[in-house]
Image (cartoon, helix red, strand yellow):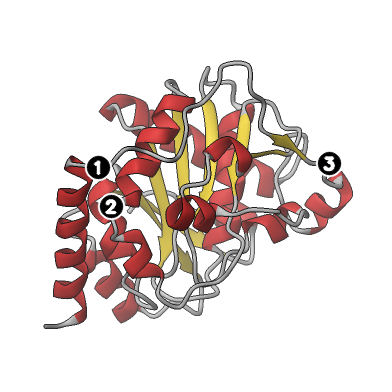
Amino acid sequence: MDRITKAVERTRQGQESALHPEESRMGHPDAGMEISRVEVSQELLRQNRIFLGEEASDYGQAYKVLRTRVWHQMRTNGWHNLAVTSANPGAGKTLTATNLAISLARMEIGRKVVLVDLDMRRPSVHRYLGFRPEYGISDFLLSGMPLHRILVDIGIDRFAVLPGCASFANSSEILSSGRMVQLLNELKRYFPSRVVIFDLPPILAADDVLVVAPHINAFLLVIEEGKSLAKDVSKAADLLKDSNIIGSVLNKTPEATQQYYGY
């Protein structure tokens, strides 16, 4: 059985197990319960190229255009979540996912935006945001820790982070256990009006993306100019042929204004 077939089979088994879950040990959100708050350095965020909304630059304008077009597609189609991935490592998909999520939150779309680090082999969202998480999404997926203990508020209105923490070589097996369905249900319960942005690993580096694809409304594909090979991008798109690819981002271009949207 090849890698793709195995991933699809694990996903099917996980969906079936989620239809008849045992008594939940995850607890239920309390309306009066607040998530953890951490202080992050604004200067460090800028050094890490995190877009905070005030920047009058071509770089900032590119993200504003991207967020507007992404939000239009999501609102038109009634989508609540979007995954950001790339063909291979190094294209900048984590930075793109982080900046897109923050930009959507600052857009004041009337919804909470949650950024979820699902790159369980190499979680790095927290590094870009400049904090060290005490817990990570693996604590929810493996031990049923309540989400309110993992979610982090970094001081940006309408924005929350569900960080990664530990690294797992068997991440696809964890994601295919049925917990992914429970994760989406928990996020819906915490944030009924929400937009969830998932940072996923590169699609050609592991089968994680194929495992979670059935639960994702749409994908955004990040391409690194001068590095991403056409054959790899084509293969990545082909693997997602049954999913909604709403666009691509051409990243690391000589000029920020050339960061394109539109697959």
- Mark closest to the chain's N terminus, 3 or 2: 3
Name which of mark 1 and mark 2 comes first in the sequence. Answer: 1
Mark 3 burial class by Cα count in 10 Å: few <14, some 14-19, many 20+: few
Quadrant of the image occupied by residue 161: top right
Callout 1 touching callout 2 (CB < 8 Å) = yes
- Give me the disc on residue 112: none
| Residue located 29% across and 42% down the image | 217
Measured Cα–Cα span from mark 1 to mark 3: 37 Å
Judged left or right of residue 231, residue 25 is right
Q: Is residue 56 visible?
A: yes
What residue does disc 3 label? 39
Q: Amino acid at mark 1?
A: Pro
Q: Is 14 or 117 nearer to us in this picture?
A: 14
Q: Residue at x 22, y 51 (%)?
A: 214
Residue positioned 21% across, 79% down in the render: 3
Q: Find residue 21 and name its label.
A: 1
> Residue drawn at (24%, 42%), measured in percent from left and top?
21
- Spatial separation of the CA atoms under disc 1 and disc 2: 9 Å
Q: Quadrant of the N terminus?
A: bottom left
